[in-house]
Image (cartoon, helix red, strand yellow):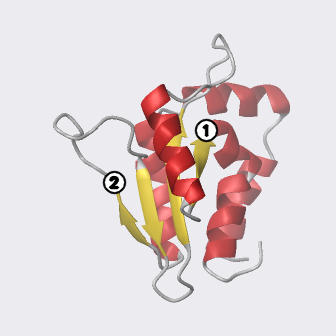
Amino acid sequence: MSLLDAMNDRLDRLDGATKKKLIQTVKEKDLRDKHIVPLAKILGYLVYWTHNSEHSPAGFPDLFLVHPVTGAVIIRELKRRRSNAKQYRPTEAQQEWLTGLGVAGLDAKVWTNDDWFSGLIREELLRGAGRAA
């Protein structure tokens, strides 16, 4: 069993209520630092994020990933879905960046904590690294 399979196997064994509660506790920073970035690095991606956006223009996405072998570019805004919140909507500035990057032909979307636990993030990173999910 690979490391990636082992990571997902543990999640697959959780019942629905436990998984839902766990999903809601994951913060954006933890999603990035403890889940996405380690997996992306294992798969060979170069990973960039702005440490402190205080003096940067509003709306630029949270993560910029490039795979130096396959040439895949993945740009993501990270959001945390909560049980008491309505469906996520990016800010106007965030949506403008995501739309502009998409029009430029880049893969620019939103990832949420739900996407980590569903396996979507893993699948997209594997695909970009030239590996089957």
Residue at (46% x, 44% y) in the render = 97
The circle drawn on residue 46 is none
Please say if 47 is above or below 129: above
Residue at (41% x, 46% y) in the render = 62
Expressed as whole percent of the image width and height from the top left, the position of residue 45 reads 46, 74
Q: Quadrant of residue 113?
A: top right
Which quarter shows the N terminus?
bottom right
Residue at (66% x, 83% y) in the render = 130
Q: Amino acid at mark 1?
A: Asn
* Foreground pick, 85 / 30: 85
Expressed as whole percent of the image width and height from the top left, the position of residue 76 reads 52, 51
Q: Is residue 68 visible?
A: yes
Q: Earlier in the sequence, mark 2 or mark 1?
A: 2
Residue at (62% x, 20% y) in the render = 82
Expressed as whole percent of the image width and height from the top left, the position of residue 109 reads 60, 48
The circle drawn on residue 113 is 1
Expressed as whole percent of the image width and height from the top left, the position of residue 49 reads 33, 54
Mark 2 Cα-neighbour bin, 10 Å: few <14, some 14–19, many ≥20: some
Which quarter shows the C terminus?
bottom right
Give the left or right position of residue 91, taking residue 85 as reference: left
Mark 1 Cα-neighbour bin, 10 Å: few <14, some 14–19, many ≥20: many
Q: Amino acid at mark 2?
A: Trp
* Element on which disc 1 rests: helix
The circle drawn on residue 49 is 2
